[in-house]
Image (tube, rainbow, N blue to C red):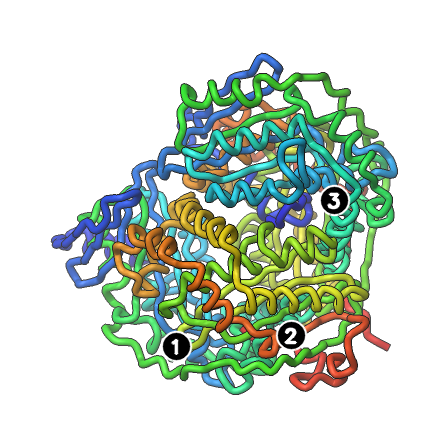
Amino acid sequence: MAHRSRLTIAWLAALLAVLVDPIGMRSAPAQVFNPESFTLSNGMQVVLIANHRAPIVTHMVWYKVGAADEPPMKSGIAHFLEHLMFRGTKNIPPGDFSKVVARLGGRDNAFTSYDYTAYFQVVARDRLEDVMRLEADRMANLMLTDAVVDPERDVIREERRQVVENRPLARLREQVQASLYLNHPYGRPVIGWDHEIEHLTRADALAWYGTWYTPSNAILIVAGDITAEELRPLAEKYYGRLKGGQVPPRLRPQEPPPQAARRVELKDTRVRQPTLTRLWLAPSYTAGEREHAYALQVLSELLGGAATSRLYRTLVIDKQLATSAGTWYEPDMLDLSSFGLSANLRPGADMRALEAAIDAEIERLLKEGIEAEEVERAKKRMQAAAAYARDELSTGARVIGTALATGQTIADVEAWPQRIAAVTPAQVIAAARYVLRPERSVTGLLLPEPSS
Amino acid sequence: MSFRILTIRLVAVVTLVIATVASASAVEIEQVKSPGGIEAWLIRDRMVPLVSMHFAFRGGAATDPAGKTGRAEMTAQLLTEGAGDLDSQKFAAMLEDRAISLGFDAGLDSIQGSVKTLNEHRDTAFDLLRLALTRPRFDAEAVERVRAQTLAAIARDAENPETLARRTWWATAFPDHPYGRPVRGTVETVTRLQPDDFRDFVRNRLARDNLIIGVVGDITPDELGPLLDRAFGDLPARSAPVDVPEVEFKGDGRTTVVNRTVPQSVMVFGEDGIKRNHPDWFAASIVNYILGGGGFNSRLMTEVREKRGLTYGVYTSLVALDHTGLVLGSSSTANARVAQALDLIRAEWRRMKEQGPTADELADAKSYLTGSFKLQLSSSMSIASMLVAIQYDNLGIDYIDRRDALINAVTIDDVRRVAGQLLDPARMLTVIVGDPAGLAPDESGAGGPAMPPARPAQGG
């Protein structure tokens, strides 16, 4: 993940698939992460995921606010504030936050998405109290001057140049995302549009902070070598005494029913690797036709999740039109999500032939349906992979943080293996027929432009 | 399919495992020797019923002959594209249906591999590994597909200013040494590679005498021993010698520009450094941490990013290869501000050379470098990789116990002396990819002394 950066759906689809999918221990009714949870008197939720492999902890604070909550003309303010959270409080001078963490032998960073903003440190277990003190301090005491805000705005514009404007594929993906959402702010890039970032001010940042950064809108997640008996008094001591205001409801413009397939083409003289990417507007766990959310995950796995799935077999191995082909779906979105597909054109192959083959493959799926065995294999793969979830220190913290920030519960996370196991072939095909319709889609092509 | 039979035969092998416990501190490393004589370092961890194994064969892409660059990397990709009686799709299905991850990767100096499996599938996982190592098929379909994928990756690299800048730097620094050639190869070489080239690589490089193994997971030494034989026992005893010469980069302060119409220029800069076995390694690590290795807390980050907002990131690192060492850095900034950013970077480089770190900076660096080491113990595979790295560099099984003392022994005089010897802006080579403004005429590099702008891919 980029430093003090953002997570967007399209950009880090692969990573998010990893974060979203591998939950669980086989299909037995075993729990997944076995977290413990309690709530402080000011409304701040606390989650503990014990992991005693090494004497280290991941300490995260998630705020239930992200880029999709930004007011018009202020795109990028959620991410801008995330950067500015490192730029000083009443007690910590600008630039010292990360220095203090490093002096403790720790690492720290943060990330912003459409629905949440999160801050984290990884430290030795005996340094947990120190980072809790620091994190609680900046939840309440942020202090900003133009002297730090102005250069930080330039940093973000450089970040945008580096991760979007210098990369043709990232520019295409930004255009595809913008074209998918006709009305919802998911159409704006998380990092913001440059012409709006340019005018974001210290006052904008402080207004954002004052509105959303409050204990009742925050979740503390600690994963690692600690028990609830040890964590609870520390959480009370540092976060429990912060005053909690109420946050406004998260009211966002919603999507109208989609009417027409859209196409976006980006041509650039630098492009040497043509790519096709397509998004379909899709339900999430909490929005739209929610009953499809689990079946869509199975669909994504069997259609484009692995080297033996349909798209790779057909496009890459049999027809030799692509060098890679895959799909992804992210159910953890507060509002309507998307189902994505991407394929890189094989050198010497024709883009029209590739697109026709993709269309034919989807047509075949919708017409002929799916073998029960194919569904079982996909489900088995997902559940077996899920057993690895506890192996990495921060996976559980990220999965649960994302879930809680997007309207899911811990019980939902823990029930994931059972819910995937319960998906039937009929449900998969019903979900495919509902989502994979032309009028729900945007097709994006990245093409070379001959230099004149 | 041959798996079932092989499984039964190998299970019957009598195990004779020698295990010695080497470290009793935070992590306990056991040295395991298999019945067949294969050695591995093991850390037992019962948290999840799985096994993660990382391993390395010394000798990597730098052993590719000049006309066959990309050979090591393409071989590494092809090892898991069909082996034994299993074609590519069958091999993939065996892995996917059991959620086994098995893969290889080529570096300049070694081929690295890893296996992660649930305990219930570990026999199959280690069988598949043996097939990949000893009976790769190199079927025509798989070879042509991986060739196309490699050519596509080369094309994508050429679009990316960051990759292009890095490769141009390496090609310019090492024009006559394998380190200057791209690991992935060029369009010309990759187009010509044939199955016999891959077979040559397998025969010469995958052997028991250049193999290093680290294992972490819910497995005992008695259980691991036979599995090691099962995976690696059929490999030849000896690898071919690695005939890569030592090399020293002699920079002269030159700046090379590769013109591209992009809004932001990418800069890669660096000079000669030291190798991992150098007695000043930790002093140099501390100097690097303070200059540009320490993320948000480095001098370069403070001056170039935090104070002036000139970049999203500026970093330096010590690059320690088997046959050379480098101090290498990178950053990026809007075209109009390249000259300003480079001036600042060079000024900090010089200030560090002339004055060295302060006592406070030294203390902070020590507390980070000692305190953060254990943070890499965050997953079974990251621990297994650490076990391989320690063996690769011959640091000793007690290295984890000794490391803090080695760092804390570094004095302010040490870091000042090392900063003075290590750093010199006059030796720095700078490569810029973009459309930079305001560079002095001798820096605009029209035509570029090193390479034509459209050359597809360069460097390590």
Residue A384 rendering spot, x and y as whole percentages: 43, 40
Q: Quadrant of residue B351?
A: bottom right
- The residue drawn where x is 67% and y is 71% is B158
Write down the chain letter for disc 1: B
Q: Circle 3 sits on which residue?
A: A148
Sequence-wise, which precedes: disc 2 or disc 1? Answer: 1
- Which amino acid, by three-letter code, is at mark 1? Phe
- Pointer 3: residues within 10 angstroms few (<14), some, or many (20+)? some
Write down the chain letter for disc 3: A
Q: Quadrant of residue B390?
A: bottom left
- The residue drawn where x is 71% and y is 79% is B454
- Which amino acid, by three-letter code, is at mark 2? Thr
- Pointer 1: residues within 10 angstroms few (<14), some, or many (20+)? many
Q: Circle 1 sits on which residue?
A: B201
The answer to whether residue A189 shows anywhere in this view is: no
Do the numbered discs 2 and 3 sit on residues whose CB atoms are within 8 Å?
no
Nearer to us of marks 2 and 3 is: 3
